[in-house]
Structure formats: C-alpha cells, structure tokens
Amino acid sequence: MLELRDVSKRFVKRLDVVERLARRLGARVDEHTVHAVDRVSLEVREGEVVGLVGESGCGKSTLGRVACGLHAPSGGEVLFKGRHIAVGAGIRLPMQMIFQDPYASLNPRMRVEDIVGEAAVFHGLVSKKDSPGYVAELLRRVGLDPSFVRRYPHQFSGGQRARIGIARALAVKPEFLVCDEAVAALDVSIQAQVLNLFMALRKDLGLTYLFISHDLGVVRHVSDRVVVMYLGRVVESGPAAELFEKPNHPYTQALLAEVPKLERRKRAYAPIRGEIPSPIAPPPGCHFHPRCPHAMPRCKTEAPALREIAPGRRSACHLNEGP
Amino acid sequence: MSLLEVRDLVTEFQTRDGVVRAVNGVSFSLEKGEVLGLVGESGSGKSVTGFSILGLVDPPGRIAGGSVRFRGEELRGMPEEALRRLRGRRLAMVFQDPMMTLNPVLSIETQMVETVLAHEHVTRQAARRRSVEALGKVGIADPEARLAAYPHQFSGGMRQRVAIAIALLHGPDLIIADEPTTALDVTVQGQILHEMQTLVRETGAALVWITHDLAVIAGLADRVAVMYAGRIVEEGTVAEVLDAPLHPYTRGLLESVPANNATGRALRQIPGMTPSLLRLPPGCAFRERCSRASERCTTLPELAGRVRCHHPHARAA
C-alpha cells in the first residue's frame, strides 16, 4: 500500500547574516546538514500495522511526516498504492496523521463540530447540511458524547482530545493512518482505552497503520511488523513476535534489555554505554559502533547494509556476515 | 523513629472555581535507606505530596493540615530560615526537568560550588573538589573539564545527572525524585536508574521516587504507595502491590499495561476518567469507575491494612 524507496530527508541549517559575512571575509563557516532520515526503504502492506521504534533523534517522526507527504523527501521516492504522493493532494487525502500532543494539535478557538467536520465538507465528502449528523456519527465512533459538538478543546481532558484528533482524521475516510506517538502523552489507563479504539477501528474500517512510538510495550502490542531506527537508518526489521523474542541487532538487544518490566524486581541495571550521538555529526561506519559491545575495527569504517537474515527479517550488522 | 513520617497531610489550591484538595490526608513513613515508589496518574497528587514534604508549596497553594516529621523533627511550621538550612543539605529534590534546578547562565562549577558553600564553611578549592567528585559519581566522564561547561552544552540525560550530582553534594538523608527519568530515552533512563540505585546503596540515603511508571518502580523500589485523587489507596511491598493488588484501581492499572495483555487482543481497560478534584464524588473517589462498587462506597473507606477499599480483592489472587 505504501512504499518508501531509499528515502532521505536532510535538514540544512542556513547561515545567518553574520556567518555569511564571516565567510565572505574568508572564515571557514559551513552549513550544518542533519541527515534525519538516511536512505530508508520501507513497505507497508494493506491492512497491516507497522510499528516504527527508536529513541529521540532517530528520525522516526521525520520518516512519518515524509510518508504522509507533510515533508518532501530530499531523495528517494514515496509511493502510495503505486503512485507518487508528490503529485497532488487528492492522493494524499486517504493518508491521515494523528499527532502526539492532544493540546497543540487542535485549534483552541474552534468548536469540535468545526474541527471534525471542516475537512469533510471542504473535500466534498458531505454537504454542509449533512455535516452535523456526520460529525455526531464520528464522535460516537471514537467514544465521545455527540452532545459535546459545541464545546472547545480546552473543555476536554487529554484522553478526550486524543479522541477528537482521531475523529478529525477519520472524517475524510482515510485508508492509512500515521500515528506519531499518539498515546505517549496519555496516562496508562487512558492509553489502554485509546489503543483499544485504534484496534477496533482497524477491524471495523480495515485501516492500515504506521505506528510510531518510543514505547516498545505499546508497539509490541499493536504491531504486526516492527522497524527499528537508529540515527536516521533502519537497523532491524521483522515480524513483531520474532523481533521481540530474538532481537538480532546489538542496538535492538540493548533497547529491549533496558525496558523496565513489571516482573523484574530490584534488578541491577546494567546499561549500555554512552548516549545517542548528535545527528549533525554521526559516527562513521555503523552509527552504533561507539556504544556497541561487539564493535570490530570494520564497524568504524564501513556501514553495514540491511540484509535479510531470515525470511521477512532484516538486520544491518557486520556480525551476521561471519568472519 | 522513622526517618520520615508523614501524617494526614493536606495540601489545597485556591482556584477561581473553588478549593482543590490536591493532597487529601496522605500518611506514610520511610526508613533509612528505603526506596518508596509513589505512583499515580496525572492529577493524583503524587508530585504535590513531594513538594509539600519539602515545604515547597507557593500560593495559591497551601499546606492545610497534617504533619511532616523528619528525623523526629516537625517540618511544618518550622521557620523558613531553618527549613532552608535543611533543604539541599539533609533533604534534596530532583525534578523532572533538570532546568528547574540549573541556572542556564551560570557554569556548572559556579552552581555546584555555590551549593556547597551555602551550607558549609569550606574553601572554594575544597568545594570544587567535592563537585568534581559528585560529577564523577553520577557517571559524567572527565568531570574536571565538564565543570566549566554551561547547562546548554549538555544533553538532557547529562543535565539530569548534573541535577542529581547537585542533590548529592551534601550527602542528604532523604532524596525526593519527581519523575526524573520520564523525559529521557529508555537507554539513558537505564543509565540514570543504575546510578541512583548504586548511590542509594552506597550512601544509605532514603529515596522517594515519584512516577507514573509501574515498571520503573518494580525494578527500583522496596515499597509502593498508589495514589488516586489525592489519597493513597494502596500501600505495601513491591511484591504485595504488584503481584497481588487488593485495590480495584491498582489492579485495573496493572491490567491495562500492554505487557500484561495478550498481543493484538483488546487491552483490559479502566472505564471513564479521573474525576475533577473540584467535583469529587462523596465517598470513594474511584467508585464511579469501579466494577465492585456498591451503596457502601458512598462513604469513605479507611485505610485498613494495605488498602483503602470497602470491597478489596481477595488476598490470594
């Protein structure tokens, strides 16, 4: 359904006036380029839930935005049902995005009826006359009382706002939802309600999801397949159950080992060393080598390719290639 | 005598719509070297409890009742000057956002040396040595050189380490940590939990770890107190509370964690949402979301043994 081919996204920090002047005068000032996403290929099949995990700065949100057409890729192609999404808004309409912050992503000065109904009327999915009934139906669908339509976002709790965001995305009859940390800001008990809603919608409406999250527990629960990113590159991908059971890449292994679990009591934490390096100057070779317990001389110079290690499973690590 | 004894603590906030009781009769005690996890969802009053212990509640909030005894000494009503001598020396706090501790325009050295000198008459050199030592203890590489840096030159995880180092400068007896790892990535969180665990073991300090994450508590704490709408609803050892929860809310919370559900199946969820503290129903605040609620629940249950509930789950569950 969605295919990303060698997609890259670079952000360039342009020089300001002083820096340009300094360069004119002969100083060595360079533009900073951030490789937020570095030649990533990804495929999402119809009806599938693909989880995209990684820590902050790994490029997962940027990739979600590129997939949705909110950012133009700096390189590579994004195809939705075989067509380039760059062509026009008509192709992108079936792809909707659900954002992390239920506070910042709703216009505080619009009523719920307008937030949810505006896009559907604009795109001619319903007439203005039928809009109130349509909105009421959507609100029921996401578990909100339709009598709330005249209210403003500030009159709702965080969990209810998340539902409004979902209703807004559903209003244009999407087939594909990109959820960017959609439950990260919610309390555990509310998070469970919203995750259940996502899964019910998947079943009832046949939706496909790209589910972006840093929360491995959540991703494991909802995803069919999982893609792990580190500093702009995919390091491992595979079916969720297999990947969580037997992670191949040292980074995935470390990440899974660090997740606090209820059944691990008074454990001794034995963390991996170091922090995520800056994406402005990522380490050469394999980005993970400075923190990797298995790093070899080769890892410092040569970036490992993402290779198939078992049917449906890929990993980017030199260890898989034997001596 | 316990290190810390909190009895019937009440903290209120005056708002335009009425008085909000963020902390509503909280009692617990803490021994030397013990780690208590204070768990709750947003608005449960867990952070305000932490602030109230240190007397850090500003108007329109006020501590309206109860007692906080630290090493046998009553902190409530203590003159501000005396309290200030305790805070930072015997009592320390680590915040969720390290920039609440750090001043962005002062170097780490200035901030740490000042903290030492505020409580002790030592030479600047001695204070500096102590600072270097403290930074090293929380796992900062090359502490000597990093001392000259400013907060913005550090990553989020490093800043949190500096904030923890400052809290540790005087070897406090009690550290209150308010969600210090919530904003951090999993691998960095693991590192900080590791440092904290080691430090508590080495120094014998008691720790109150405030969080919404039950899994973090499982790995770190000796005892857990679960808060809901300003009250402690269940308290016990980690094994008691997490393996055999008695309160329907604690059980509901544990059941809604994805790891405790079959993959891909609907998660067990607690219906409804946290009630507004302005319009708390009389009796048990959880009753409107509770499947076990009855007529009796319109009266407030007392904390009996581990749990505050008229219809707790059976012990052998």
Image: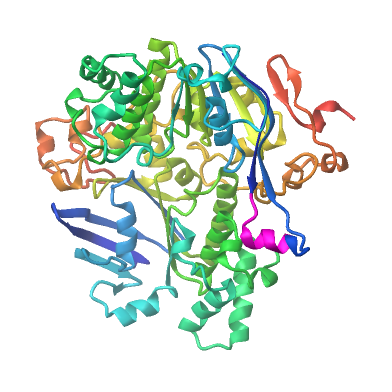
Q: Is residue B103 left or right of residue B132?
A: left
The residue at the point 60 percent across, 43 percent down is A57
Colour setting: rainbow
Residue closer to the observer: B18 or B182: B18
Quadrant of the rendering where the C terminus of chain A is positioned = top right
Q: Position of residue A255 (x, y in %)?
A: 62, 38
Is residue B267 in view? no
Q: Is residue A18 magenta?
A: yes
Where, by quadrant of the figure, is residue B165 drawn?
bottom right
Residue closer to the observer: A160 or B254: A160
Q: Is residue B13 magenta?
A: no
The residue at the point 57 percent across, 62 percent down is B152
Quadrant of the rendering where the N terminus of chain A is positioned = top right
The residue at the point 61 percent across, 84 percent down is B126
Q: Which residues are magenta?
A: A14-23
Prevalent SS, magenta region: helix
Q: Is residue A60 left or right of residue B34?
A: right
Q: Is residue A54 left or right of residue A222?
A: right
The residue at the point 57 percent across, 35 percent down is A62
Q: Position of residue A123 (x, y in %)?
A: 37, 18
Q: Is residue B283 above or below residue A216?
A: below
